Image (tube, rainbow, N blue to C red):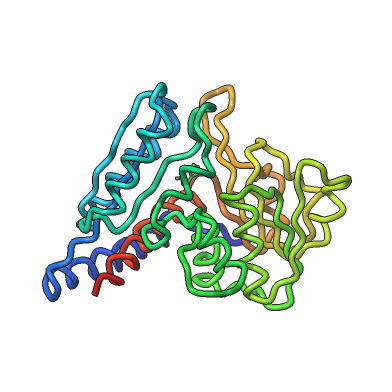
Amino acid sequence: MQRIDGQSLAKKVQAEVAQEVAQLKLEKNIVPGLAVILVGDDAASQAYVKMKAKACEGVGFYSITHSMPESISQDEIIATIEMMNANPRIDGILVQLPLPKHIDTTKILEVIDPKKDVDGFHAYNVGRLVTGLDCFVACTPLGVMKIFEAYNIELKGKDVCVVGASNIVGKPMASLLLNADATVTITHIHTKDLKAHTSRADIVVVGVGVAGLIKEDMIKEGAVVIDIGINRIADGSLVGDVDFENVSPKCSYITPVPGGVGPMTIAMLLSNTLKSAKARI
Ligand code: GUN
């Protein structure tokens, strides 16, 4: 069993981004800029946004965080996004999800200029991803693809089971895998027999937010298991969606939580923002 070290891989990607940023500054006088919108005071969202801002600083980006109260109106969020769309210093706009219930998330995401949509959530980018065209791809699934590439994990013709069909993770993940010639099954909350699907897969990618959902008898010997879940359990520790202790001995490769996919998400956000800044040239 090989434990996938997302932390080291993310550091490597960040170092590469930092080097390109330095070169962009020197040769073209361009400093990539990321704007983050945070609405409300959800502790997890605040923590993620802080990590993103720190990572931006680390690679030499210009970054701003717009924190807004829970009670903000949809129109005010839209006006802020429109301001950022028009700001030439901003290459990437990210609205941290989830948004409060009175806000229409789809509407908000559609206001972001697709060329600045470094989260890859705008329908324009999602459509291009499904079609197999160049676009911004959601950071978490893109980070998983980077892991496959770095660890030379072959996808062509493989049976891959994606557990979870969210717009942020499961659906873009499935599109990327299909584009890489894998045979993809997507399971979700209404799937009749989850184990029947996971246990015959060469690769299982799970991101649903249920601690310990994937158990030893659901994974075939030698499978690759990618765990995107992050769940805080009663003792305060963070665990994934996979029962790591019992599943890992059966795997050829497995990502731990924390230190697996998580760090790659932020690394891909930096990479997407750099890509957007390079399009200025
Ligand atoms: N909430 C959970 N994951 C993400 C993400 O990747 N991007 C944004 N914007 N919000 C999230």
User: Residue 272: where, in percent of width, then height?
Assistant: 38, 62
The answer to whether 129 appears left or right of 99 in the picture is right
Could you tell me which residue is drawn at 49 percent across and 60 percent down?
143
Q: Is residue 55 above or below residue 76?
A: below
The answer to whether 159 appears left or right of 225 in the picture is right
User: Residue 152: where, in percent of width, then height?
Assistant: 56, 75
Q: Is residue 116 above or below residue 64?
A: below
Could you tell me which residue is drawn at 52 percent across and 64 percent down?
147
Could you tell me which residue is drawn at 24 percent across and 63 percent down?
18
Q: Is residue 234 above or below residue 184?
A: above
User: Residue 92: where, in percent of width, then height?
Assistant: 33, 55
Comparing 113 with 258, the one in front is: 113
Comparing 40 with 220, the one in front is: 40
The answer to whether 119 appears left or right of 190 in the picture is left
Comparing 73 with 151, the one in front is: 73
Could you tell me which residue is drawn at 31 percent across and 53 percent down?
85
Q: Quadrant of the C terminus?
A: bottom left
Q: Quadrant of the N terminus?
A: bottom right
Q: How many marks?
A: 0
User: Residue 116: where, in percent of width, then height?
Assistant: 36, 58
Q: Is residue 103 above or below residue 129?
A: above
The answer to whether 215 appears left or right of 274 in the picture is right
Comparing 36 with 152, the one in front is: 36
